[in-house]
Image: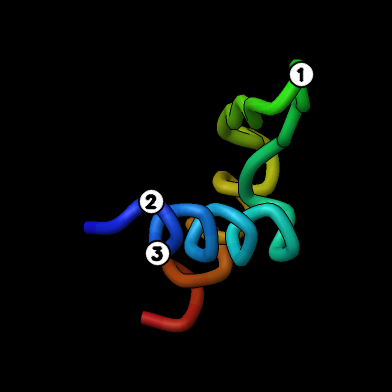
Amino acid sequence: MSQSTASQFMATLHRAGLVHCTRIGQWSHYSRNEDAIARLGALIAAEL
């Protein structure tokens, strides 16, 4: 996967609130938003 594709994917996850983004210089560091991921999982489980 190209760097630009990965960046677009991570930007989508950030807009959805599933990851946090911290900029350090020219680099973006991402971490999971565990609360949002848990809520999404519960929502999906409720639909099944």
Residue at numbered disc 2:
3
The secondary element bearing badge 2 is classed as helix
The amino acid marked with disc number 3 is: Thr
Residue at numbered disc 3:
5
The crowd level at tag 1 (other Cα within 10 Å; few <14, some 14-19, many 20+) is: few
The secondary element bearing badge 1 is classed as loop
The secondary element bearing badge 3 is classed as helix
Quarter of the image that includes the N terminus: bottom left
Rounded to the nearest whole Å, what is the CA distance between mark 2 and mark 3?
5 Å
Residue at numbered disc 1:
25
* Mark closest to the chain's N terminus, 1 or 2: 2
- Compare residues 45 and 3 and report the one nearer the observer: 3
Q: Is residue 34 left or right of residue 47?
A: right
Give the percent coordinates (x, y) of residue 13.
59, 58
Q: Is residue 16 left or right of residue 41?
A: right
Looking at the picture, does residue 39 appear above or below residue 44?
above
User: In the current view of this chain or complex, which residue is farthest to the bottom?
Assistant: 47
User: Residue 26's quadrant in the figure?
Assistant: top right
The crowd level at tag 2 (other Cα within 10 Å; few <14, some 14-19, many 20+) is: few
- Compare residues 3 and 22 and report the one nearer the observer: 3
Q: Which residue corresponds to the image point at 50% horizontal and 73% vertical from the top-left?
A: 46
Q: Which residue corresponds to the image point at 65% horizontal and 36% vertical from the top-left?
A: 33
Contact (Cβ within 8 Å) of mark 2 with mark 3: yes
The amino acid marked with disc number 1 is: Gly
Q: Nearer the viewer, mark 3 or mark 1?
A: 1
* Mark closest to the chain's N terminus, 3 or 1: 3
Quarter of the image that includes the C terminus: bottom left
Q: Which mark is residue 7?
A: none
